[in-house]
Image (cartoon, rainbow, N blue to C red):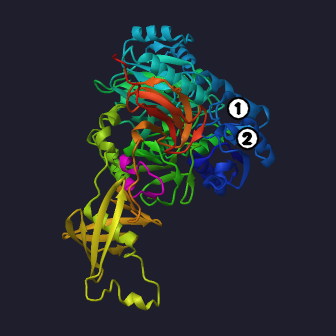
C-alpha cells in the first residue's frame, strides 16, 4: 500500500479522497491556490503545499508545480481526482517519469480515449456500437454543415476533447448551425485548448446511461453496473441514480459486456466510465444503445455506484496502483437497492442558473439523512475561479421509491445563506412526476424548466416571521436586563411595530403588534394573521390560522432567509430614509449579470445593432452566457475589453438611439 498520496485537486473530491486515505492509514498532502488557502481540503490533509495564484491555469493546471510539490512533501503517488489534470496524458506520463505513481490509467490509455473522434474509431474496431455521425478531422465550417445535413437535423456538436458538456451544442436547423459551431469551438478551445468538434445524430428520446468499469495491471476488468445520468441541464448532470430505471436484465448484461470490451481494447487499469446514449422511444432494448465516450478517471457521480455495490472505489484505486489485483471478480459483484445523488451548487435557478459568488454565511447539510460529500463549510467564499459545487447529497434505499423519497427529504433540510443555491430546484426535480415514475430522459428538465425554476410567492407566515426577525422581536433578551420584563411596553397604546422588507426587488410592508405570551398580530399585504412563533429545536414552530408551520429563520445583519418545506425566501430591510434609485437609462446599458470574464465582444463604438443581437459573451464557473441588445440602437460606449474580468452589474456597453432616417 502507498505511504503518502498528494491529491492534485480541490473541493469535495479532494476531501473525499483524503477520508479514504485516512481510513487506510495513508498520509495525505493537499495542494492549494491563493483562493483556497483556508479551504476545507487543506484543513483535512496531513500537510498542504501552496502551488500558485487563484486562476486554475496558474495553479491546479500547472503539472510541473504539482509534481514539484509531491517531491517536496515526500509523496510516492499523485491522485488527480476529476477535472483539472485527471485526463491529461502528458501529466500522467510526467508523474510516472518522475518516479511517482499516478493513481489512474496510463498516459497511453488516456490518450486513446481523450479525443472523442479517435475513441469512436477505436470502439468501432472493437465492435462496440457507436452513434452515427462525423468523427473525422476536417473542421471546415462548410464541410461540417454539409455533414450535419447528411446526418439529418437535429444534430449534436461536440468538442472532441474534454467533457462535462463543454463545447456541446444541440442544433435544430442548418440556419443555426454556424453560430452554434463557432460558440462550441470557442468554448472547447478555452476549456481544453482544442477547438476541434465532431458532429453526431441527436437521439430524440435519449437516456444517458454509463457503466462503471475497473481494471488492474494483471489483465482483469470488471464492470460495477450502470448509472443513469439522464437528468441534465446544458449537458451537465444534475441528479444521477443507480441502477437505471426500466433496465432489462439482458440489456444490463449486454451493455456491461460492451463496456468491459471497450476497457480491454486499451489495456485499461484503474477506475473509468464508459458512457452510452440509449434510445428510450420504445423502452430500453439490448440493441438500442451506442458508445459516446470514455471518462478515464473517477466520476463525480461515483458514490451511487458505491452505495449499491458496497465498494469504496477510491480504495480500489489505491490498491490497484499498489500492484494488487482487483478485490472482487465479476461474479462477486451484485446490486443492493437503489441510490441517488444530487449536485448542490451555488447558483440561482430563478435567474437562469447564474453562478452565485460570495461568502457562504451559513451552511446546514442533512448529514443524518444522507451521505454528504462536500468541500466547503460556513464562512468559505464561493469564488469565480472554480466550479461552484457546495456538496453532493447521496441517498440509498432498498428500492427506488424509498431512495428518492429520502433524497427529497434530505434536500428539504438543506439550509444555506450568503449565496443562492439550487436546493429548491433539486427538490422540485426529485418530486417531478415523470422522474418519480422512473421515466427520465435528457430533455426532461428543459420541458419542465418553467415550473422547476419559478419563483414561489412567500406565504404570509414566512413574511411575518421575516419581519419579526429583522425587527429584533425574536432576539433573546440580555440577562439581568430590567427592560426585558416589559417587552413591547407602550404607554396608553398597543405595542406595535412596522417594517418594510425587500424580496427580489419587491417591497412588502408588514405591521405587527405584540399580544403577550409570545403571540403577535401581523398584517401582511392587507391580510391579518395571528402568529405564535416558538422555538422547536433549531426551528420556529409557528401557528397561523389554526395551522402549525415549521420554519427556519437565519438572520444576517440586515437580512434574513426563511426556509419552509424545501423552499427558501431571502428578505432584507428597506431603509425608510433612502429614496428609490432611479432606473433611467437602464434599458440603454448592457450590464454583467454575474462576475466573470468578458470572453468576446461583438460591438464597436458607432456600430448599429438590432434587438436580440449578441453583443458580448461572458464566461464564469465553466458557463458561457451571451448578452444581447435590449433594443435597436447604436453603440455609444464600450467600457470593457475582451479578456477583462468584471464584477456583477458592471456596465459593459452603452446604447444610444439609432440616428433618425432623413426622409427629405
Residue 411 highlighted magenta (yes or no) = yes
Q: Residue 483's x, y, as percent?
A: 41, 89
Which residue, given by chain and number where applicable, does mark 1 sit on?
91
Q: Assess whether mark 1 and mark 2 are in contact (beta carbons under 8 angstroms).
A: yes
Q: Is residue 40 left or right of residue 211?
A: right
Asked whether 313 or 159 is in front, the reply is 159
Residue 44's image quarter? Answer: bottom right
Q: Is residue 98 above or below residue 487?
A: above
Say which quadrant the C terminus sits in: top left
Q: What residue is drawn where x is 49% and y is 40%?
A: 592
Mark 2 → mark 1, Cα distance in angstroms: 10 Å
What residue is at 55 percent from the left and 36 percent from the top?
Answer: 639
**Visible residue check, residue 320:** no
Q: Which residue is at the far front?
A: 664
Above or below, 563 against 641 in this view is below
Judge from the rendering whether residue 16 lies leftward or rightward of residue 309; answer left or right.
right
Q: Position of residue 498 (x, y in %)?
A: 31, 71
Q: On the rendered structure, is 183 left or right of 30?
A: left
Indicate which disc residue 42 carries: none
Q: Which residue is mark 2?
A: 66
User: Which residue is more in the foreground, 327 or 172?
Assistant: 172
Judged from the image, the secondary structure of the residue bearing numbered disc 2 is: helix
Amino acid at each position: 500500500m502507498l505511504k503518502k498520496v498528494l491529491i492534485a485537486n480541490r473541493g469535495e473530491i479532494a476531501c473525499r479522497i483524503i477520508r479514504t486515505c485516512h481510513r487506510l492509514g495513508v498520509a495525505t498532502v493537499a495542494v492549494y491556490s491563493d483562493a483556497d488557502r483556508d479551504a476545507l481540503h487543506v484543513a483535512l490533509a496531513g500537510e498542504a503545499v501552496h502551488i500558485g495564484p487563484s486562476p486554475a491555469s496558474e495553479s491546479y493546471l500547472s503539472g510541473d508545480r504539482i509534481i514539484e510539490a509531491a517531491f517536496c512533501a515526500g509523496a510516492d503517488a499523485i491522485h488527480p481526482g476529476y477535472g483539472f489534470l485527471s485526463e491529461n496524458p502528458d501529466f500522467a506520463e510526467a508523474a510516472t517519469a518522475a518516479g511517482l505513481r499516478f493513481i489512474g490509467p496510463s498516459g497511453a490509455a488516456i490518450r486513446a480515449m481523450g479525443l472523442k473522434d479517435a475513441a469512436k474509431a477505436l470502439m468501432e474496431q472493437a465492435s462496440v456500437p457507436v452513434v452515427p455521425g462525423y468523427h473525422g478531422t476536417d473542421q471546415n465550417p462548410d464541410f461540417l454543415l454539409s455533414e450535419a445535413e447528411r446526418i439529418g437535423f437535429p444534430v449534436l456538436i461536440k468538442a472532441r476533447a474534454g467533457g462535462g458538456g463543454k463545447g456541446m451544442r444541440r442544433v435544430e436547423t442548418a440556419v443555426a448551425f454556424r453560430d452554434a459551431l463557432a460558440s462550441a469551438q470557442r468554448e472547447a478551445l478555452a476549456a481544453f485548448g482544442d477547438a476541434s468538434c465532431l458532429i453526431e445524430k441527436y437521439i430524440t428520446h435519449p437516456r444517458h446511461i454509463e457503466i462503471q468499469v475497473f481494471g488492474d495491471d494483471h489483465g482483469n476488468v470488471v464492470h460495477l453496473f450502470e448509472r443513469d445520468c439522464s437528468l441534465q441541464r446544458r449537458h451537465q448532470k444534475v441528479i444521477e441514480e443507480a441502477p437505471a430505471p426500466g433496465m432489462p436484465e439482458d440489456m444490463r448484461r449486454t451493455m456491461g459486456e460492451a463496456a468491459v470490451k471497450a476497457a480491454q481494447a486499451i489495456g485499461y487499469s484503474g477506475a473509468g466510465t464508459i458512457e452510452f446514449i440509449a434510445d428510450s422511444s420504445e423502452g430500453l432494448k439490448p440493441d438500442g444503445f451506442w458508445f459516446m465516450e470514455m471518462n478515464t478517471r473517477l466520476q463525480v457521480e461515483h458514490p451511487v455506484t458505491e452505495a449499491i455495490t458496497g465498494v469504496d472505489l477510491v480504495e480500489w484505486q489505491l490498491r490497484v496502483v499498489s500492484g494488487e489485483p482487483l478485490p472482487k471478480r465479476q461474479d462477486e459483484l451484485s446490486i443492493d437497492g437503489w441510490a441517488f445523488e444530487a449536485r448542490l451548487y451555488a447558483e440561482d435557478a430563478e435567474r437562469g442558473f447564474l453562478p452565485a459568488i460570495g461568502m457562504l454565511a451559513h451552511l446546514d447539510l442533512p448529514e443524518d439523512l444522507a451521505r454528504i460529500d462536500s468541500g466547503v463549510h460556513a464562512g468559505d467564499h464561493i469564488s469565480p475561479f472554480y466550479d461552484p459545487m457546495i456538496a453532493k447529497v447521496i441517498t440509498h434505499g432498498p428500492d427506488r421509491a424509498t431512495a428518492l423519497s429520502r433524497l427529497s427529504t434530505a434536500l428539504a433540510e438543506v439550509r444555506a445563506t450568503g449565496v443562492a443555491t439550487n436546493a429548491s430546484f433539486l427538490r422540485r426535480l426529485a418530486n417531478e412526476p415523470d422522474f418519480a415514475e422512473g421515466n427520465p430522459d435528457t430533455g426532461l428538465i428543459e420541458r419542465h424548466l418553467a415550473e422547476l425554476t419559478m419563483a414561489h410567492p412567500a406565504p404570509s407566515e414566512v413574511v411575518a416571521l421575516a419581519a419579526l426577525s429583522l425587527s429584533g422581536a425574536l432576539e433573546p433578551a440580555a440577562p439581568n436586563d430590567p427592560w426585558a420584563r416589559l417587552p413591547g411596553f407602550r404607554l396608553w397604546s398597543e405595542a406595535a411595530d412596522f417594517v418594510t422588507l425587500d424580496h427580489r426587488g419587491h417591497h412588502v410592508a408588514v405591521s405587527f403588534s405584540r399580544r403577550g405570551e409570545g403571540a403577535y398580530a401581523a398584517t401582511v399585504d392587507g391580510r391579518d394573521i395571528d402568529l405564535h412563533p416558538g422555538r422547536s429545536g433549531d426551528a420556529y414552530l409557528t401557528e397561523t390560522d389554526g395551522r402549525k408551520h415549521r420554519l427556519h429563520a437565519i438572520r444576517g445583519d440586515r437580512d434574513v432567509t426563511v426556509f419552509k418545506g424545501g423552499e427558501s425566501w431571502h428578505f432584507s430591510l428597506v431603509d425608510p430614509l433612502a429614496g428609490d434609485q432611479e432606473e433611467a437609462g437602464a434599458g440603454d446599458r448592457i450590464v454583467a449579470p454575474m462576475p466573470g470574464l468578458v470572453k468576446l465582444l461583438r460591438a464597436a463604438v458607432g456600430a448599429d445593432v438590432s434587438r436580440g443581437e449578441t453583443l458580448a459573451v461572458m464566461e464564469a464557473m465553466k458557463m458561457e452566457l451571451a448578452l444581447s441588445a435590449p433594443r435597436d440602437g447604436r453603440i455609444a460606449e464600450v467600457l470593457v475589453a475582451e479578456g477583462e474580468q468584471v464584477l456583477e452589474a458592471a456596465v459593459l456597453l452603452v446604447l444610444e438611439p439609432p440616428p433618425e432616417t432623413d426622409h427629405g
